Image: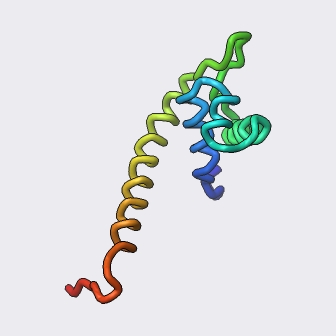
Amino acid sequence: MMDQKVNWDDFRFLLSIFRTGAISKAAKRLGVTHSTVSRRLARLEGEYDTRFFKRLKDGLEPTEACHEVVELCSGIEAHVHGIQHVGHVVSALPASFFVTF
């Protein structure tokens, strides 16, 4: 795993599954198909050789590993939203605006 690049999108899918409690609800929230979410989760679990959810008759139960990853990813997600906000602010500045140091 050390030399592998991390795919943030896969972790976004994991967060959505965790927050909605179901693959189908996550798919609806993300605007993709159930099979896409299921496939992305399987790929993520395969890459990390870890089960993030226990598959139960009545749904999914997050594992301890899932809780740990969700906590880390929530922080990353907040930073990503902050960066996007800065990007919107910068793009809204007049073309003649600049900062000197």
Q: How is the image coloured?
A: rainbow
> Taking 30 as reference, is 54 above or below it?
above
Q: Is residue 101 left or right of residue 87?
A: left
Identify the image quadrant of residue 97: bottom left
The location of residue 81, given as percent across then percent down, is: 42, 53
> Taking 92 as reference, is 27 above or below it?
above
- Identified at 60% across, 53% down, the residue is 6
Q: Is residue 6 left or right of residue 49?
A: left
Taking depth in this image into account, of 95 and 55 the one nearest to the observer is: 95
- View extreme (left): residue: 101
- Identified at 71% across, 18% down, the residue is 55
Identify the image quadrant of residue 92: bottom left
- Identified at 44% across, 48% down, the residue is 76
- Identified at 61% across, 50% down, the residue is 9
Taking depth in this image into account, of 9 and 26 the one nearest to the observer is: 26
- For the C terminus, the image quarter is bottom left
Taking depth in this image into account, of 74 and 88 the one nearest to the observer is: 88
Taking depth in this image into account, of 59 and 65 the one nearest to the observer is: 59
> Taking 10 as reference, is 84 above or below it?
below
The location of residue 70, given as percent across then percent down, is: 50, 35
The location of residue 26, given as percent across then percent down, is: 63, 34
Q: How many marks?
A: 0
Q: Is residue 21 left or right of residue 67?
A: right
